[in-house]
Amino acid sequence: MRHLLSAADLKLDEIETIMDLAEEMSLVQGRPVKKLPALRGRTVVNLFFEDSTRTRSSFEIAGKWLSADVINVTAKGSSVSKGESLRDTVLTVAAMGVDALVIRHHASGAPWQASQWIDAHVLNAGDGTHEHPTQALLDAFTLRRHFRTTEPGLLDFSGKRIAIVGDITHSRVARSNVLLLNTLGAQVILVAPPTLLPAGVDSWAAAVSTDLDEVLPVVDAVMMLRVQRERMSGGYFPTSREYTIGYGLTLPRLRMLQEGAAICHPGPMNRGLEISAEAADAANSLVLDQVAAGVSIRMSILYELLGGADDSPPPGHREAVVHA
Amino acid sequence: MSQVLLAGADLLGRGRADLLIADGLLADPASAAADAQRIDAEGLIALPGLVDLHSHLRQPGREDAETIASGTAAAARGGFTALLAMANTDPVTDTAEAAEHVANLGRRDGRTLVVPVGAVSKDLAGEELAELGLMARSAAAVRVFSDDGHCVADGRLMRRALEYVRAFGGVIAQHAQDPRLAGRDACCHEGAISGRLGLAGWPAVAEASIVARDVQLAELTRSRVHVCHVSTAETVDVLRWAKARGVAVSAEVAPHHLLLTTDEVVGYDPVYKVNPPLRPAEDVTELRKALADGTIDAVATDHAPHARHDKEHAFAEAAFGMLGLETALGVVVETMISSGALDWPGVADRMSTAPARIAQLTGQGRPLAVGEPANVVLVDPAARSVVDRNASSSLSRNNPWHGRDLPDPVVMTFWRGECTYARS
């Protein structure tokens, strides 16, 4: 694997390899000394054009536990307003001799563009309203663990129904999850008011519903998406109250779920808006497991990209590292 | 002044004849002087010089992206002898002085006639009328007004503009884009691809709804409206309806909307970011039909050069626009001639006669007849080449045709009898 830009890049066996490795990586989390020497001498730059404390921390911890040198570069604000092009920013950072760039950008497609310009590995840590493939991987990893508690040895998600609820239009988490969960064989149901369903959603490999009550009783897991408060001023829905009543995972709705059905949320949660405190803290809520899984999955991916024997950056690139 | 004899050219594909260029005019070939320069035009078709209703020449203001010299050189290479320079320069062409400045730069540096388009509103802000009458009375004699790049979204302002320019036979060229339905963040066609890529969409209705309003305003005010860069089948339907009612409306289509589709944006390459955006194949088909049957009157390039660094941003943040002057005729040959949708007289109409009529350019878009201005382009209907963005006369490289095999018909261009481009 050269880059991780989209969840669609991953085949079933690759997803399973990443998840199996993440299981091993998760063992490190329980040790008093949380350090593996796997990526010693490798440099990972977290290039964040948009704030995201949790994703950045997760990548930073993952890299450090693998002994990589991890540097955080914040390039907040529009590069257009600063007068530096995206290409210049990316080339500048890459020219310092980094092995992998973890890119978070407020604009869709930016990591893909970056991967065209540089030799280093590019990891998409969330681009605009496009994709967030490591989030989808950690969600799948968390769900696999959850499903395995009752079905030991479960490999893929065939026969599983998973609902994704909320602002699908603006959600990179939803896009990556639809792609990844399909590869894993699950049936995905998207639930949102029509204003928050993206153009062309009928062509996605997912069922679509505008009625959460009809969907909840039949799913094995429900992923609640964060609702940005600014969507209200955009006229996507009238009030937060109306949203909660229509699409929130409220206490009454919690009881509609099948026993053992999992509750996920990529965070940060708006308690009381898209998810009630009771749902967030329920026994079958996997919210904190997702956060923990994030580190394991990102360790696994960094190792896949940088630690493999087949990893051979172009000669010029290595020299740049030596002379740096 | 020396004479040039174009020997054996096929005039608009209707039959072979010699053309004699003398003193900037077409003259009787029988009167050719013994020392007239003879150019063998055997196998070539002669068309009246092309007229572009819609170019962005970036001067004054962004001379790093294009100048009147470089833009008109690209135009001459594309077979054009006149072009209308859009008003969104810096400063904006919203006063008589600014319009005269552009016209003067054209006279000094142009390889084609350069006709300034005046802004409809001050500073293109869409709030108050610019000095339309003074621009019309100026030495630049502005007749076409447009806030292109921005829509005159306020219905009342559009109504006043249409009414006001009736006094001097002006026309309002509208960039039809409802800013509430397609705001500045809308960067590609709204549909399955925008949804999948997570890009803010530009729905077709944002264009057609403004056109529907404007043709009714034109009817109400008994004035003339011109619709810039029509991109959707829905707009074509509205135009058909309006023309059937006898509304004074004309419309143009850009070459890229005749061939490229929204599928191009899948790779997030900002070279394909253009406003209005590339649309699905069904729209492309309807646009070709509308151009063939005259519902769309003209082809206009919307040539929009940008400095490299203004395109090397994330797709959503990169500048809108693509080059078009050098390749326009090639794209029209590919999409309209090759399919039989238009013949050569049809191409001459859509790319020369009709745009000259819309812009009221008396010396352009004329028949190839004795006594007419010698604005002529010689084309080789069979020539093709692979477009190389680095071989362009434009200062910019945002060329969506780079690497594509296209008809490359323009062999020579004459403007007022002077050769402004000759294939080497």
Image (spheres, grey):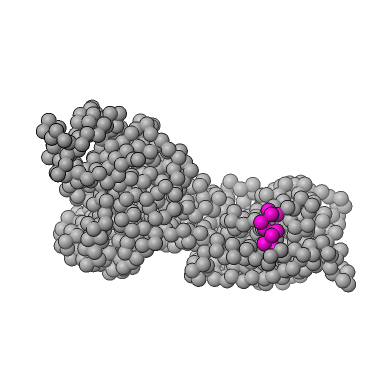
The x and y percentages for residue B135 are: 20, 63
Q: Is A318 contained in the magenta span?
A: yes
Q: Quadrant of the N terminus of chain B?
A: top left
- Between residue A221 and residue B419, name the one nearer to us: B419
A63 to the left or right of A94: right
Q: Position of residue B81 (x, y in %)?
A: 25, 47
Left or right: residue A167 compared with residue A66: left
> Residue B53: x percent and y percent?
28, 50
- As displayed, is residue B95 above or below residue B250? below
Horizontal placement of B134 versus A160: left or right? left
Residue at image location 19% in from the left, 50% down from the top = B360
Q: Is residue B369 visible?
A: no
**Quarter of the image that includes the C terminus of chain B:** top left
Question: Most prominent secondary structure in the magenta stretch?
Answer: helix
> In the rendered image, is residue B81 in sight?
yes
Magenta span contains residue B266: no
- Residue situated furthest front in the rendering: B35
Per the rendered image, the range of residues in magenta is A313-321
Locate residue A98: give its quadrant: bottom right
Q: Residue at x 15, y 58 (%)?
A: B168
Which residue is rendered at x = 16% and y = 41% of the image? B2
User: Residue at point 16% right, 61% down?
Assistant: B139
- The one nearer the camera, B422 or B403, is B422
